[in-house]
């Protein structure tokens, strides 16, 4: 039962202090979901440098692998594994997305900002710089498109049997929702509501330098609306 695309809601708050967040989103990018994994991406900056943020949801006891390579290229993928058993993102050297993965990168470039678990699903939020200054990585260039391989499994050797390939853009699609006015003040979202058919995450930050809350509302298939309310 996959999640439908997440809805972003921003609520302005007054009298709340905040500090600059790690990842600043310019726009939402990729949205992919199947029976095993849901993947969203955002283009923005990490510590002032161009970066992409991945939001990966996969069943507990499983792992999800994301691989990057230039569109049309036959070089291997720059692979990142979100492993629910160790609650970590593991960066591997460039290799093909087939069979067991080998040789973790000596320079780990998957920056895990946050993770949470709800109803047997674990969600990872990790950022990856465009330019990692690592010869074992595929370096991303703004304004370009890349093949993103997606695979899942539940073994300890990350044995990839099949891969779905989608397109990841390192630029803002004009049809994508702009969220460039929100700057996160904490490391990542934290689940505040989890019920049948609904998951709500919140992030404290600022909009145009004013304290605010960002709500991410995810509806499961079969539900068409969600309502949230605040009170003292």
Image (tube, rainbow, N blue to C red):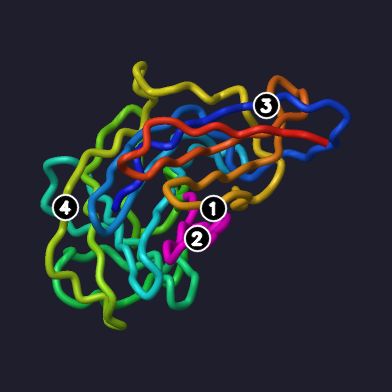
Q: Which residues are magenta?
A: 110-127
Q: Secondary structure at mark 2?
A: strand
Give the mark nearest the N terminus, 1 or 3: 3
Q: Which residue is mark 1?
A: 194
Q: CA distance from mark 4 to mark 2?
A: 25 Å
Q: Which is closer to the viewer, label 4 or label 1?
A: 1
- Measured as percent of width and height from the top left, residue 210 is found at 77, 23
What number is the disc on residue 34?
A: none
What number is the disc on residue 118?
A: 2
Magenta span has 115?
A: yes
Camera-nearest residue between 150 and 52: 150
Q: Quadrant of residue 5?
A: top left
Give the mark nearest the N terminus, 1 or 2: 2
Q: CA distance from mark 1 to mark 3?
A: 20 Å
Q: Secondary structure at mark 4?
A: strand
Q: Which residue is mark 3?
A: 11
Q: Quadrant of residue 20?
A: top right
Q: Secondary structure at mark 1?
A: strand
Q: CA distance from mark 2 to mark 3?
A: 24 Å
Give the mark nearest the N terminus, 4 or 3: 3
Camera-nearest residue between 57 and 181: 57
Q: CA distance from mark 4 to mark 1?
A: 29 Å
Q: Which residue is mark 4?
A: 164
- Measured as percent of width and height from the top left, residue 137 is found at 34, 57
Q: Secondary structure at mark 3?
A: strand
Q: Residue at x 36, y 61 (%)?
A: 58
């Amino acid at each position: 039962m996959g999640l439908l695309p997440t809805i972003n809601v921003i609520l302005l708050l007054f009298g709340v202090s905040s500090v600059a967040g790690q990842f600043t989103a310019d726009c939402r990018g990729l949205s992919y979901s199947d029976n095993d994994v849901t993947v969203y991406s955002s283009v923005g900056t990490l510590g002032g440098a161009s970066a992409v943020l991945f939001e990966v949801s996969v069943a507990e006891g499983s792992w999800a692998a994301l691989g990057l390579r230039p569109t049309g290229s036959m070089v291997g993928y720059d692979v990142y594994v979100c492993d629910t058993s160790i609650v970590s993102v593991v960066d591997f050297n460039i290799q093909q997305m087939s069979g067991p993965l080998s040789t973790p990168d000596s320079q780990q470039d998957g920056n895990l900002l946050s993770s949470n678990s709800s109803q047997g699903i674990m969600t990872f939020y990790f950022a990856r710089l465009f330019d990692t200054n690592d010869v074992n990585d595929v370096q991303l260039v703004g304004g370009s498109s890349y093949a993103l391989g997606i695979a899942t499994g539940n073994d300890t050797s990350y044995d990839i049997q099949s891969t779905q390939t989608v397109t990841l853009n390192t630029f803002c699609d004009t049809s994508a929702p702009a969220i460039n006015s929100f700057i996160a003040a904490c490391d990542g979202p934290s689940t505040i509501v989890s019920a049948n058919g609904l998951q709500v995450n919140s992030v404290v930050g600022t909009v145009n330098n004013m304290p605010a809350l960002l709500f991410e509302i995810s509806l499961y298939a079969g539900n068409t609306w969600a309502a949230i309310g605040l009170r003292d």
